[in-house]
Image (cartoon, rainbow, N blue to C red):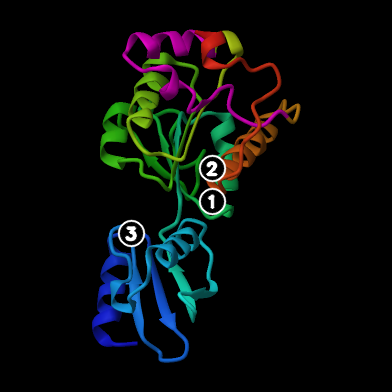
């Protein structure tokens, strides 16, 4: 690898930017591919660049035939993030599960008696109010946001910020009645049907979950499906935004 390519790769990784190293196997020629740089040094066609882009989005290393050339694509992506609003019992189960699945987890809760290191060992805690925390955390396309407090003062600002972001998954815990009221508040705040349809509420796949750990499993499964670009199942009995608002 040329020094200039290595230095650029390390710089992009330090900035936590998605990047793929594309190597033409026959010649050893290399270039870097990001969402704004389409490996022009290798002269890839738009169709070939889209192949690399798909590998980048799917975190998939491997050989690809690009414009008739055998290439190896090595993806260097930052860890996906999970922002959990509310240091509640479900969060205590969800945070370590998500960390084991490779997520960088942050639990946001201004209630200091809830968000303690004793209750969340090894988890990044943020004691700001959700609107302030979300402004600093800046959810991106590799971020999932889950609100678990049932308290509109905490959940609604976080959901508003998430809806204004490209977060790949937005989930909100609560009954159908609670979620319907939530959608009504967000509608009055100026969000449309298309925005509200992004919210998985009640959050989690319909697996009959009862305990905090079971609910955490259902939420993690649903956001995994969303991340892997699979259509996630709407929980049984959950109404569409049009029906709930």
Q: Quadrant of residue 238?
A: top right
The CA distance from mark 1 to mark 2 is 6 Å
| Secondary structure under the numbered disc 2 in the rendered image | helix
Quick check: 150 left or right of 132? right
Q: Where is 62 relative to 127, above or below?
A: below
Q: Please tell me whether residue 202 belongs to the stretch shown in magenta.
A: yes
Q: Quadrant of residue 177?
A: top right
Q: Where is 174 relative to 98, above or below?
A: above
The CA distance from mark 3 to mark 2 is 21 Å
Q: Which residue is mark 3?
A: 16
Residue in front for this viewpoint, 165 or 52: 52
Q: Please tell me whether residue 191 belongs to the stretch shown in magenta.
A: yes
Give the quadrant of the N terminus: bottom left
Q: Which residues are magenta?
A: 179-206
Q: Earlier in the sequence, mark 3 or mark 1?
A: 3
Residue in front for this viewpoint, 185 or 85: 185
Residue in front for this viewpoint, 166 or 204: 166
| Secondary structure under the numbered disc 1 in the rendered image | helix
> In the rendering, which numbered label is found on residue 222?
none
| Residue 172 image offset from top left, x and y in percent | 51, 25
Foreground mark, 3 or 2, reads: 3
Q: Residue at x 71, y 28 (%)?
A: 206
């Amino acid at each position: 690898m040329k020094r200039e390519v290595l230095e650029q790769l390390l710089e992009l990784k330090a900035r936590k930017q998605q990047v793929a190293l594309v190597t033409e196997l026959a010649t050893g020629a290399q270039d870097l591919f990001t969402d704004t740089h389409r490996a022009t040094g290798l002269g890839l066609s738009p169709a070939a660049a889209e192949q690399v882009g798909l590998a980048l989005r799917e975190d998939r290393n491997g050989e690809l035939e690009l414009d008739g050339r055998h290439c190896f694509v090595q993806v260097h992506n930052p860890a996906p993030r999970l922002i959990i609003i509310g240091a509640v019992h479900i969060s205590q189960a969800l945070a370590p599960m998500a960390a084991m699945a490779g997520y960088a987890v942050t639990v946001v809760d201004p209630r200091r008696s809830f968000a303690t290191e004793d209750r969340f060992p090894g988890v990044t805690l943020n004691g700001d109010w959700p609107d302030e925390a979300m402004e600093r955390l800046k959810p991106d396309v590799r971020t999932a946001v889950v609100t678990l407090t049932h308290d509109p003062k905490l959940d609604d600002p976080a959901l508003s910020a998430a809806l204004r972001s490209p977060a790949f998954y937005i989930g909100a815990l609560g009954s159908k009645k609670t979620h319907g009221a939530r959608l009504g508040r967000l509608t009055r705040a100026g969000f449309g049907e298309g925005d509200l349809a992004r919210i998985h509420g009640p959050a989690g796949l319909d697996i009959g979950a009862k305990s905090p750990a079971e609910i955490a499993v259902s939420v993690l499964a649903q956001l995994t499906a969303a991340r892997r670009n699979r259509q996630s199942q709407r929980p049984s009995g959950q109404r569409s935004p049009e029906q709930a608002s």
